[in-house]
Amino acid sequence: MQKFRELRGEFVRYASLSALGTLGTSCYILADTFFVAKGLGTAGLAALNLAIPVYNLIYGVGLMLGMGGATKFAVSASQGEREAGNRAYAMALLLAGIAAVAFVAAGLLFPAEIARLLGADEEVFDMTRTYLQVLLLFAPAFLLNAVLVSFVRNDGNPRLAMLATVGASLSNVALDYLFIFPCGMGIFGAVFATGLAPVIGVCILLPHMLRRERGFRLTCRGLHPRLAGQEAALGFPSLVTQLSSAVVMITFNFLILDLAGNVGVAAYGVVANLALIAVGLYTGVAQGAQPLLSRAWGQRDGEGLQRLTRWSTWSVLALSLVTLAVILAFPGPIAALFNGEGDAVLQGIAEQGLRLYFLSSPFAAYNLLLATLFPSVERALPAHALSLLRGLVLLVPAAFAFAALWGLVGVWLAVPVTEAVTAAAGYLVLRRERARGFGGELQP
């Protein structure tokens, strides 16, 4: 029992620190939302919301490479294979560099085309283009920060990983205020502050990178397609989660733009960005459990794996119910925080959206946990299927169908219905995998 008490203590430490860290990351865009709403009004808020899917894509690629590479590193370290862990780190950095070049090229060459593709009209086009261009040029910093945070957490330093993400987020809040209000830099100031945040995060991580006793080192091994594919596969559910958010935002933006115009899109921005905070909490618990799950898997510790799964599940469900209770109790004051112009239409749409959209909280929390749990034990395929199911296969058709039937109410309700169906499927898959000992590896 002493072993499991110690394991529970580790879980609480890793999960709480990771949740604080991902909460900080989620606050990047929330800070932009708040200060843009106060400084630039409804048009600025609409422009920001149109650009956020690109942030989801950048952050998702970073998470895919960081989580995938760090999972390989953690499993290798638990089995004493130090060189394999070093190769996983080098591969993650190499893939991040390739992705960074692609994002920067898009920012230099195609910001206007991307803005139009995302639905920016003449009223918000210039602000959307500016935000997109600067965001894409800072992509290398976002990618490097995501990779380093994942490896530092898996190298037994969740506290520093948390400090890096929280420190970056707090700097973003301070710089947002400074650039938008005293400096009067408008939408450029908002995105410049956001872009500087991961740079600060990387600087905070440097002490770990300079430690002689750290568990991973950079090796010049070149591109190994098999290892690259393994890392991408293990991290792919994290990418799908972010891509799903991006696709959902694009879909909802177009549907709501048709139903309620730019004011409706601005109101959806309030709902979506608050949802990012909730997702950050749930994802943080899952990412905090991941190093421990991967270690238990590498050591073939079936009992430890079951306990960690149970603790993680109850933790995310408890957080989701608290989140839902707060939203249902205070939708008006919460929406008013982001309604800088006191727009009654925006206020009404946002309040309705908060009440209906956040009914998905318990189901989304469980789905996000499964998206991390399966890759942690090198079971990427179930996570791929569930992530695609909740993000694309069910949600997009449901949004169009429900919008046609019930208008804005249908758009909001598409999310909880989709998450509930996916959670039911995920529960059945998890039961099957546990009964099989995750493929037989943990069977006696």
Image (cartoon, rainbow, N blue to C red):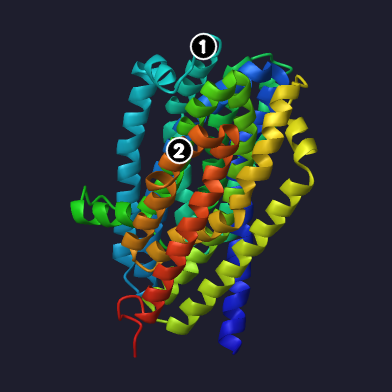
The residue type indicated by label 2 comes to Ala
- Three-letter amino acid code at the position of disc 1: Asp
Image position of 232 with respect to 39: above or below: below
For the question of whether residue 190 can be seen, the reply is: no
**Residue beneath disc 1:** 126
Q: Quadrant of the N terminus?
A: bottom right
Q: Please give the residue where the numbered disc 2 appears in the rendered image.
A: 401
- Kindly state the secondary structure of the residue where label 2 is placed: helix
Residue 235 locus on image (x, y percent): 37, 53
On the picture, is 203 further left or further right than 171? Answer: left
Q: Position of residue 273 (x, y in %)?
A: 61, 37
In depth, the one of 434 and 155 nearer the eye is: 434
Q: Nearer the viewer, residue 175 or 218?
A: 175
Of labels 1 and 2, earlier in sequence is 1
SS category of the residue bearing label 1: helix
Foreground: disc 1 or disc 2: 2
Residue beneath the point at 46% across and 29% down: 138
* Res. 54 mark: none
Position of residue 90 in the picture relative to residue 129 (left or right): left
Q: Residue at x 44, y 58 (%)?
A: 371
Q: Nearer the viewer, residue 165 or 117?
A: 117
